[in-house]
Image (cartoon, rainbow, N blue to C red):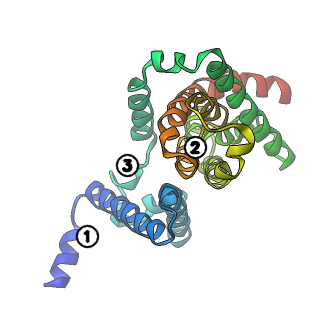
Amino acid sequence: MFANAVNSFAGADHLIISIALVALIMFVTKKISIMMGEERIASALAIITGLVLAYIGGRVTGGSSGLADVSIFGGAGIGLLGGSMLRDYTIISTAYGVKLKNLKKAGPVGVISLLVGVTFSFVVGSIIAVILGYTDPAVVTTIGAGAVTFIVGPVTGTALGVSSEIIAISVAAGLVKSILTMIITPFIAGLVGLDNPTSAMVYGGLIGTTSGVAGGLAATDPELVPYGAMTATFYTGLGTLVAPSIGFIIVRALLT
């Protein structure tokens, strides 16, 4: 009976299997984060797990698409579920759910924090890419975009046609930023005056990583989470607009 169940599952639709795998990863990482007493890091653990599984899948199959190269997850499975189409759809749907009038509550300071935050992260990420020896404008732009957030990196990389390895680096850069934000925020909150809605919105605009800001603010003061997450969402949207366009044009002008 067990063998029949396994065979039936293996013959099921690849997309259903892939969704089940993602759900299992989220469930397990949620439980692990609760056991660790750090529930806010569940999303970071899930992302790390996905990256590790993608690496293992690529190494085992010798392919370049991670788990999508494994037959049970192939076809319209992980490749579709984690592909650019659904990724961009989620970003657009999130952006449509944000109301511009909410951003106005932060005032000019909130808008300025968004511009400064995106620009600073992109510049730092691009400089690090050049220091590491990358000279191709598209590659440097993608890594710089990854420093903005781990969503902006893949969007930019796909738009500029870079390799999956570079996109993975951009995701890793954004993931490191997100985890560090979660850890550091509670310790610096008192130093930067992170104790009211306005400062939380400015902080979200400067840092940008929604999961990192939300996790860090949750450990600082749960009431501040919606305010920081609101501007952080705009940050991601702004990054996806300017990184593959204005950002790429400027980097290309500087490197060629």
Q: Which residue appears at 51% of the width and 32% of the height?
A: 227
Crowd class of label 2 (few under 14; some 14 to 19; many from 20; radius 10 Å): many
Cα distance between the residues tagged 1 and 2: 39 Å
With 24 as the anchor, is 181 left or right in this view? right
Q: Quadrant for residue 135, please give it.
A: top right
Identify the disc placed on residue 10.
1
* Residue 7: percent from left, percent from top: 21, 75
The mark closer to the camera, 1 or 2, is 2
Crowd class of label 3 (few under 14; some 14 to 19; many from 20; radius 10 Å): some
Q: Quadrant for residue 4, please give it.
A: bottom left
Q: Inspect the image, locate mark 3, and give the three-letter code of the amino acid beneath it.
A: Leu
Identify the disc placed on residue 122.
none
Read off the residue under disc 2. 213
Cα distance between the residues tagged 1 and 3: 17 Å
The mark closer to the camera, 3 or 2, is 2
Crowd class of label 1 (few under 14; some 14 to 19; many from 20; radius 10 Å): some
The one nearer the camera, 16 or 231, is 231
Read off the residue under disc 3. 81
Q: Which residue appears at 45% of the width and 33% of the height?
A: 91
